[in-house]
Image (cartoon, grey):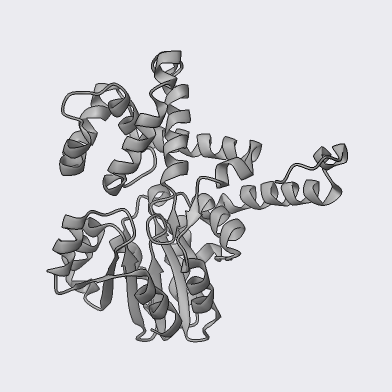
Amino acid sequence: RTALADSRASMPTVGSIASKAFTRARFRASARVDARPRARMATFASSETAPRVIFALDFDGVVCDSVGESSLSAWKHGEELWPDVFDADATRAEKERVLDGLRAVRPVVETGYENTTLARALLERLPGYSIEEILNDWDGLSGALMDKWSLDRATMVEAFGRIRDDWILNDFDGWLAPNALYPGVAEAVLAAQERSDAAVKIVTTKQGRFALAILERMGKISIADDDMYSTTVSGIPKTDVLRTLGVDGNPRKIFVEDKLSTLEKVCKADDLDEWELFLVDWGYNTESERARAAANDRITVIDISTFISLLREG
């Protein structure tokens, strides 16, 4: 917001108060997306008119660059979970180094709370947890940290979500600012939504209410509750979500991801052969992963311009 000399500029207007009230009310209402995943999946086939093409889009790394926000949320979570470790002058001096490290290791993160354990590992420079080692074997290393600090996955998911909830309700613009929609993506999603023959689904490990808030405020994109699938909350893997989509008719099915391991799981499922698989080259993946994807006959690596054309015309 631009600072004005007139002191009245700092006073909230009726419009700004109403806007904040709407934002909070809409965000609270959107929590229902995270509360009813199984029921929505069970009723999907009977509640949709069959489209000609279905786009199943991952969110973080495909639609949104959220690493700035998720890293800051992890730091806040660390301060709450381990105040003796994070809440000290010497620790705060290391914050930027840790945030840079979290961006570097983002390709291996599946679920938001993992950033919290990564933040502490990077902060304390734990042996065996260099950036290179994390990138090479996070699946093997992550469980060891959970055991080391006696952490429970469900509790971590709930707490990480609550950290975000509190930040959003107290400072929505501050929470939103570190997020960014990739250039051209919002316009492409809107164009796909306007097509009479297409349906857009968001299939994400992010808790749905956070994705909805970003889409609505930053992209002016409205996603129906029935089109938002949060696998973190439901515990249902993306492969099973894909099995529920397009069961009516015989639509073209397009799944766009930034995480190669997810696409490789789809490749192993014979009953998902009808899905066309795309790995984006702008998300949270590495050069070696893109090379591996290019060598896989089932997977196509695409750039942003191809993605935009796909949603507009595919």
Decide if residue 168 is on the left or right side of residue 54: right
Count of all numbered marks drawn on residues in the image: 0
**Which of the 4 image quarters holds residue 104?**
top left
Q: In this view, does 250 lie above or below 107?
A: below
The residue sitting at 31% across, 47% down in the picture is 110
Q: In this view, does 153 lie above or below 277?
A: above
Q: Is residue 100 above or below residue 314?
A: above
Decide if residue 23 is on the left or right side of residue 195: right
Residue that lies at the very extreme toward the left in this rendered image:
295
Where does the image place residue 224, in percent across and percent down from the top left? 56, 66
The residue sitting at 47% across, 36% down in the picture is 73
Q: Is residue 114 visible?
A: no
Where does the image place residue 234, in percent across and percent down from the top left? 40, 51
The residue sitting at 43% across, 74% down in the picture is 45
Looking at the rendered image, the quarter that the C terminus falls into is bottom left
Decide if residue 257 is on the left or right side of residue 203: left
Where does the image place residue 128, in percent across and percent down from the top left? 16, 28
**Which of the 4 image quarters holds residue 306?**
bottom left
The residue sitting at 25% across, 78% down in the picture is 274
Where does the image place residue 290, in percent across and percent down from the top left? 20, 61
Return the residue nearer the eye: 96 or 148: 96
Q: Is residue 161 visible?
A: yes
